[in-house]
Image (cartoon, grey):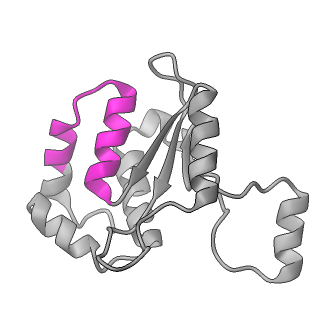
Amino acid sequence: MTEKEILEAEKDYSEAKIQHTCVCWFRMTFPKVDRLLFSVPNGGWRGGRAGASMVYEGQVKGVADLILLFPSGGKASLCIEMKVPKRKGSKAGTQSDEQKSWQELVERNGSVYAVCHGIIEFITAVCRYLRVSPAPYIEEALNKYPLYR
């Protein structure tokens, strides 16, 4: 597939599907540190009791969807907020106020934060954080896509 074809396909994907694709790519690409990238179960609907329990246990509004707990370039971690591609006339694909506030806190305290709207932006963010060129990884993903479903 071409980059344009992937971007077009991802317009119909849910945030969960895009995130799954990105996590699969990371785990296949960096198997020695694959478990250092993990999701934070902050989103989604929960009943009152479950939601209250999560807050009681330490849930924080606005926390990024994924965290790569691997230091690089003097930074502590890479926090990734996954979003669907932006759509005209819709708030889909944009950060909430809580997410923006959490981003500022994270960046102020030694971590990197990225908002990714698909696999290409995700690969770019991860590779820049790890200080490697994203080009060969993007090319490989284009050749293998949609393997990561």
The image shows residue 127 at horizontal and vertical percentages of: 32, 34
Residue extending farthest to the left is 2
Q: Is residue 116 magenta?
A: no
Quarter placement of the C terminus: bottom left
Residue extending farthest to the bottom is 47
Residue 69: quadrant of the picture: top right
Decide which of 137, 118 is in the foreground and name it.
118
Question: Which residue: 59% across, 25% down?
Answer: 110
The image shows residue 7 at horizontal and vertical percentages of: 20, 66
Main SS of residues in magenta: helix
Decide which of 100, 24 is in the foreground and name it.
100
Decide which of 30, 4 is in the foreground and name it.
4
- 94 horizontally vs 146: left or right: right
Quarter placement of the N terminus: bottom left
Question: Which residue: 85% across, 81% down?
Answer: 48
The image shows residue 55 at horizontal and vertical percentages of: 85, 62
- 139 horizontally vs 57: left or right: left
Question: Which residue: 11% across, 64% down?
Answer: 4
- 138 horizontally vs 148: left or right: left
Region of the chain picked out in magenta, as a range: 118-140
Question: Which residue: 57% across, 44% down?
Answer: 103
Answer above or below: position of 66 versus 11.
above
- 32 horizontally vs 5: left or right: right
Answer above or below: position of 77 versus 102.
above
